[in-house]
Image (cartoon, helix red, strand yellow):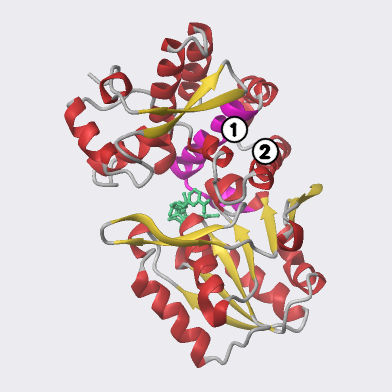
Amino acid sequence: MTAQDLMVRLGDRSYTIKFGRRTIAGIGRFCLDIGVGKQVAVVSNPTVWKHWGDGVDRALAAEGFIVHRIMIPDGESYKNSETLNHIYDVLIETGMDRQSFLLALGGGVVGDITGYAASTYLRGIPFVQVPTSLLAQVDSSVGGKTGINHRLGKNLIGTFYQPRLVLIDSAALDTLPEREYLSGLAEVVKYGVVCDGSFFDFLSQGVEKLLSRDGDYVLHTVRRCCELKASVVERDEREGSYRAVLNYGHTFAHALEKITGYSRYLHGEAVAIGMVQAARLSETKGYAGHEDTRRIVDLLGSLRLPTELEGFAPDEYRAVMLRDKKVRDGGINFVFNRGIGNSVIERVADWDYLLQYVV
Ligand SMILES: NC(=O)c1ccc[n+]([C@@H]2O[C@H](COP(=O)([O-])OP(=O)(O)OC[C@H]3O[C@@H](n4cnc5c(N)ncnc54)[C@H](O)[C@@H]3O)[C@@H](O)[C@H]2O)c1
């Protein structure tokens, strides 16, 4: 099963996203095609490696690549400078030069830190993304945001640095834990709400297929998300303005994750709740109707995602939201949905307005 390649058009930083099932077996050949050097360091974690590592190793070795393995611990809390330094250590010790490249095999954590290492080591060496979580396949592996967390905040250190190739193997999702898979679906729904109403319809009609991870359906879904993300990134690579539509639901999500200590919700779960808040606020502006909100809540609910905000006091949200790195002069660029399939970004500085549905 394959799907057509997709090109992310960014001038001399353009690259191809390849899609299919069991495409990991072809990674060696695809890397040859993009003309990188012979030495590669594959960055992964033990959870992902046990399922997919040997396949990647074999496929690269079969094409003559010299493969170094860099194993990092599994988890968001390891997306930090200590892990980054470990990656640099191995790159230096193994003599990786400017022609060598990095390959990220894993979810968004592995992808973000590997991209950051690639963008900074020797002032930048090529890197390839092989995303294995749904979130990474539909979101983090495309668009070139890389980074690590700082003890004072998430994703505070980072670069824009595009990969040279993204290889998406839908079979990788077979081993993804259920909760991680469902959490990734929240970002999928987001694309439908802010970018493409007919894609939202497609998702609403395919709930059973999405839940059962139907191969063709999921592949089509992932490809459409990448297409939508690519078109947003092509228009605004460095989030000057338009790219921010992809932050739909995220203002509330980040606050909720922070208040709950990043332990109660997976990111997509918090995003699902944040999207419902954003949908309600869009209704108050007259940008969307009650029926639009109902459809968004229904779709998220039928994908077994949470939709209601935890009952913390509005002041707690306000305090956390005001510290969001996207706040400027006490206000935030908030993403509203216009009906389903369109969006508008508006500055909001009235926190009582934003928090009116927090009870
Ligand atoms: N760069 C971007 O544009 C961007 C966008 C969104 C999110 N992110 C970042 O992405 C990260 C979240 O990514 P995530 O949700 O993939 O989390 P993650 O990388 O922690 O992966 C989630 C869990 O699933 C496991 N896993 C991944 N693939 C698997 C597979 N095929 N089989 C079995 N287990 C598998 C991982 O080991 C991990 O335990 C955050 O750090 C976030 O900041 C980046």
Can you tell which mark lies on residue 228?
2
Furthest residue in direction top, as rendered: 290
Name the residue type under label 2: Leu
Over which residues does the magenta segment extend?
172-195
Q: Nearer the viewer, residue 122 or 4?
A: 122
Compared with 98, 78 (above or below) is above
Name the residue type under label 1: Tyr
- The quadrant in which residue 216 appears is top right
Can you tell which mark lies on residue 191?
1
Picture residue at 80% right of the left edge, 71% below the top: 29
- Percent across and percent down for residue 37 are 72, 82
Q: Residues within 10 Å of mark 2 (few under 14, many from 20)?
A: some
Decide if residue 183 is on the left or right side of residue 216: left
- Percent across and percent down for residue 136 are 55, 51
Picture residue at 71% right of the left edge, 80% below the top: 61
Q: Nearer the viewer, residue 6 or 45?
A: 6
Compared with 322, 170 (above or below) is below
As helix, strand or loop, the secondary structure at mark 2 comes to helix
Check contact, mark 1 vs mark 2: CB within 8 A: yes
Pointer 1 or 2: first along the chain: 1
Compared with 254, 56 (above or below) is below
- Percent across and percent down for residue 107 are 51, 56
